[in-house]
């Protein structure tokens, strides 16, 4: 082979190698793009899955909080009613003691009680009725 033929074969081999390198580089580039696209798509699907799971957890959390609030409100109402009943009972005792002491103090001062005034009023009504009977005869 002549130098020109050897040179031509070498150039052809270099061109073939260069073409092969370009083809491999393009394949690597396309593989990278494919991986990026797949990661983007799968990442979006993964993100959507996380959102769905998060919504489920949020719903469960709200239900749990609502149950606990309802239980706390129920217990609070029970305690409130119990305290109210006890306070009313104590107030009734204090009120009765106050009434008895005021009544006793008024009795010591010779001031008639409501009961005494009611008795006198009924006696006056009886006497008025008797006077009307007598005057009508």
Image (cartoon, rainbow, N blue to C red):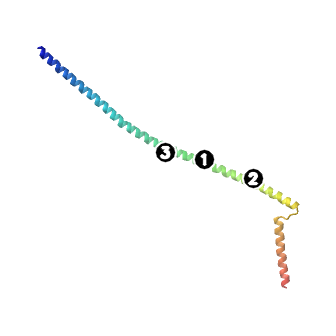
In primary-sequence order, the first of circles 3 and 1 is: 3
Residue beneath the point at 77% across and 56% down: 95
Disc 1 target residue:
72
What's the CA distance linking mark 2 and mark 1?
27 Å
Horizontal and vertical percent position of residue 6:
14, 16
- Horizontally, residue 56 falls left or right of residue 121, namely left
Element marked by disc 1 = helix
On residue 59, which mark appears?
Answer: 3
User: Residue at the bottom extreme?
Assistant: 137
User: Residue at the left extreme?
Assistant: 2
Residue beneath the point at 70% across and 53% down: 85
What's the CA distance linking mark 3 and mark 2?
46 Å
Disc 2 target residue:
90
Element marked by disc 2 = helix
Mark 2 vs 1: CB contact within 8 A: no
* Quadrant assignment, res 32: top left
In primary-sequence order, the first of circles 3 and 2 is: 3
Position above or below: 117 against 4: below
- Horizontally, residue 78 falls left or right of residue 126, namely left
């Amino acid at each position: 082979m002549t130098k020109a033929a050897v040179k031509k074969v070498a150039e052809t081999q270099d061109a073939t190698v260069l073409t092969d390198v370009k083809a491999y580089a393009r394949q690597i580039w396309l593989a990278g793009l494919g991986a990026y696209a797949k990661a983007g798509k799968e990442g979006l699907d993964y993100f959507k899955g996380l959102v769905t799971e998060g919504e489920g957890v949020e719903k469960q959390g709200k239900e749990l909080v609502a149950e606990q609030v309802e239980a706390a409100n129920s217990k609070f109402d029970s305690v409130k009613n119990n305290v109210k009943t006890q306070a009313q009972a104590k107030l009734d005792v204090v009120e009765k003691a106050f009434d008895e002491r005021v009544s006793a103090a008024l009795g010591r001062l010779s001031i008639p009680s409501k009961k005494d005034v009611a008795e006198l009023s009924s006696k006056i009504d009886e006497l008025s009725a008797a006077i009307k009977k007598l005057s009508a005869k």
